[in-house]
């Protein structure tokens, strides 16, 4: 990374379940709240804004959020779409934009599933317009829905239903305990009076999850309980050059990769390997690991492939409990790293990794510098 960019501030909004606490807040306004909170912590006007987004109204939502946040009109902004990896990709790009005369760069992601517009293919002949819920991830027929792909991945790696249920229950248990201990307090910025995440459920046990039916394939093992939610939220970090001498998280390595679009959930594996190689580190060197828990079976397959003990990952709960606001989720992972490595002094090295539809993955390796 050029001059080893340093993440010097990191905040996120609460993560709302679609249609619930943040249902009336647009993606731009969620992003604006996170931008405002981070900008207030940096005594310098932003040089640039980079935000990830998947399902907003189109246009340059990063610019709308920048202006809504009251940042100077001279601040340029660009929106990134790498599907679920958009927020982490935005931070990767932001780290490459930082230089001695061009900082801070504010980077992250924002998503509002609640206010996402309806989308239609134009009519063909006399047929009416056809509504669709997501854009293509890849050309047909290599374009499975993420849940279907997660079921196939779990089956291919021999990830049992029992193991998935146990991992999902763990995510909720850890997130509830972390929230009760105040572990999220310093990273959260209130929005519309909302001060906590909607989704984590106390008392969600493996036994309760075992009662749920398969959600995508009647013969499969993935259920709604072992899948992430549909969510609203935003997360933003501020990046400075290493030469500024500021404490935070030094970006040691970053990578985005492509894989077979039929196996999108595995995309984070080669991304992690590349990012670790760039950083000169191995899995065993990492103190804090944050992986986007899109599906329990999917991430367990990735852990097995990488040789990671699942108990080392998302120790304060992950997306299965907190939620997955698509374009923001990668940035949420980095905010979680900042909290644990900087605010809570939980170690030295950290990893954030996420897979994306269409067969992509992004990973970021950081080092706490104090």
Image: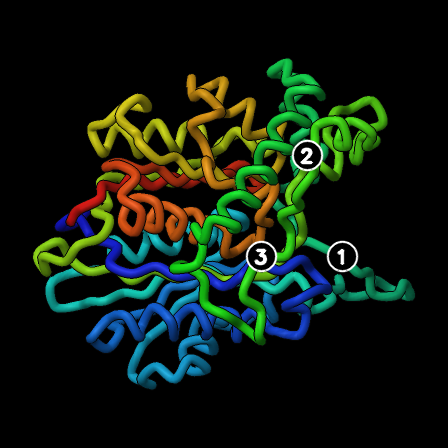
Write down the residue under mark 3: 197
Mark 1, residue position: 132
Query: Residue 359: x percent and y percent?
Result: 54, 36
Residue placed most toward the observer, 259 or 38:
38
For the view shown, which residue lies furthest in the right direction?
126
Residue 210 in the figure: left or right of residue 296:
right
Nearer to us of marks 1 and 3 is: 3
Q: Closer to the N terminus: mark 3 or mark 2?
A: 3
* Residue identified by numbered label 2: 226
Res 19 → quadrant: bottom right
Q: Earlier in the sequence, mark 1 or mark 3?
A: 1
Which residue does the image show at 72% across and 37% down from the upper left?
A: 225
Residue at x 52%, y 60% (from the top left corner): 53
Q: Element at badge 3?
A: loop
- Which one is closest to the eye, mark 1 or mark 2? 2
Give neighbour class at mark 3: few <14, some 14-19, many 20+ (Cα, 10 Å): many
């Amino acid at each position: 990374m050029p001059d080893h960019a340093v993440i010097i501030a990191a905040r996120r909004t609460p993560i709302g379940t679609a249609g619930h606490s943040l249902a009336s807040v647009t993606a731009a306004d969620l992003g604006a709240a996170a931008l405002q909170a981070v900008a207030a912590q940096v005594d310098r006007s932003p040089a640039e804004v980079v935000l990830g987004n998947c399902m907003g109204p189109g246009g340059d939502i990063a610019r709308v959020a920048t202006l809504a946040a009251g940042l100077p009109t001279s601040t340029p902004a660009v929106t990134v779409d790498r599907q679920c990896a958009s927020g982490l990709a935005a931070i990767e790009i932001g780290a490459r934009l930082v230089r001695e005369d061009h900082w801070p760069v504010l980077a992250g992601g924002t998503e509002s599933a609640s206010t996402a517009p309806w989308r239609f293919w134009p009519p063909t002949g006399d047929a009416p317009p056809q509504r669709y819920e997501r854009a293509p991830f890849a050309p047909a027929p290599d374009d499975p829905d993420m849940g279907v792909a997660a079921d196939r991945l779990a089956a291919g790696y021999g990830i049992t239903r029992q193991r998935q249920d146990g991992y999902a229950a763990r995510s909720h248990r850890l997130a509830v305990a972390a929230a009760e201990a105040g572990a999220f307090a310093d990273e959260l910025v209130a929005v519309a009076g909302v001060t906590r995440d909607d989704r984590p459920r106390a008392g969600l046990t493996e036994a309760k999850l075992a009662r749920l039916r398969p959600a995508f394939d009647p013969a499969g093992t993935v259920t709604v309980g072992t899948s992430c939610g549909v969510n609203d939220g935003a997360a933003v970090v501020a990046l400075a050059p290493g030469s500024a001498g500021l404490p935070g998280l030094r970006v040691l390595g970053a990578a985005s990769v492509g894989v077979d679009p039929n196996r999108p959930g595995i995309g984070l594996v080669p991304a992690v390997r590349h990012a670790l190689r760039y950083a000169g580190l191995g899995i065993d060197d990492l103190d804090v690991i944050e992986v986007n828990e899109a599906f329990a079976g999917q991430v367990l397959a990735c852990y097995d492939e990488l040789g990671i003990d699942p108990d080392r990952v998302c120790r304060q709960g992950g997306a299965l409990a907190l939620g997955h606001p698509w374009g923001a989720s990668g940035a949420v992972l980095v905010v979680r790293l900042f909290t644990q490595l900087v605010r809570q002094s939980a170690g030295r090295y950290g990893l954030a990794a996420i897979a994306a539809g269409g067969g992509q993955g992004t990973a970021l390796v950081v080092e706490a510098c104090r």
